[in-house]
Structure formats: C-alpha cells, structure tokens
Image (tube, grey):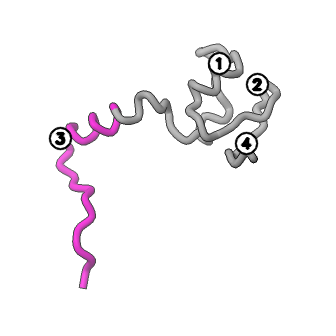
C-alpha cells in the first residue's frame, strides 16, 4: 500500500509523491532545473540533503530569538 500524498503535476502530466523534496521530484520526472514548479509549496522539504544544514545555520544566525519552549504560564 502507498501512503504518500499525491498531487497531479501539470508540467510532467503525472501524479507525483509529495513525501520527497521538490528537487528529488524534478530529477525523477526529468524536469529542467529552470522549470518553475507549480507544486513547490506542497513538498515536505526544500531538499532533504540540505535541510539539516539550513537548521544548523539558522541556530547560529545570531538572531537572539529563543525558540526553546519554556515552562507553561500559570
């Protein structure tokens, strides 16, 4: 059984799995890197290989914002 969310792509004219990144989908379906993807906002991650790098870069950005959940307010 296939549990991945699917969506029809008007560019490649096929149903594509959304549990991958957009670049992975583009490689799988032969889309040009310059082809704008109409489904880009639906994919799970920008690129699974780069996601950890982006997270660690955001942590070291020096924004000063603490996103660590603290104790619940009383």
Q: Which residues are magenta?
A: 53-74
Q: CA distance from mark 1 to mark 2?
A: 9 Å
Q: CA distance from mark 1 to mark 3?
A: 34 Å
Res. 35 mark: 1
Q: Are marks 1 and 3 in contact (CB under 8 Å)?
A: no
Q: Earlier in the sequence, mark 4 or mark 2?
A: 4
Q: Decide: few, some or many residues near mark 1? Use Cα within 10 Å; few <14, some 14-19, many ≥20.
A: few
Question: Which mark is nearer the camera, 3 or 4?
Answer: 4
Q: Earlier in the sequence, mark 1 or mark 3?
A: 1
Res. 57 mark: none
Q: Earlier in the sequence, mark 3 or mark 4?
A: 4
Q: Earlier in the sequence, mark 3 or mark 2?
A: 2
- 4 vs 67, left or right, is right
* Residue on which disc 4 sits: 6
Element type where label 4 sits in the image: strand
Q: CA distance from mark 4 to mark 1?
A: 20 Å
């Amino acid at each position: 059984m296939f549990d991945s969310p699917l969506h029809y792509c008007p560019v490649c004219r096929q149903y594509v799995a959304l549990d991958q990144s957009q670049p992975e989908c583009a490689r799988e379906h032969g889309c040009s890197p310059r082809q704008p993807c109409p489904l880009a906002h639906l994919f799970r991650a920008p690129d699974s290989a780069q996601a950890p790098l982006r997270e660690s870069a955001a942590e070291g950005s020096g924004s000063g914002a603490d996103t660590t959940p603290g104790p619940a307010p009383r």
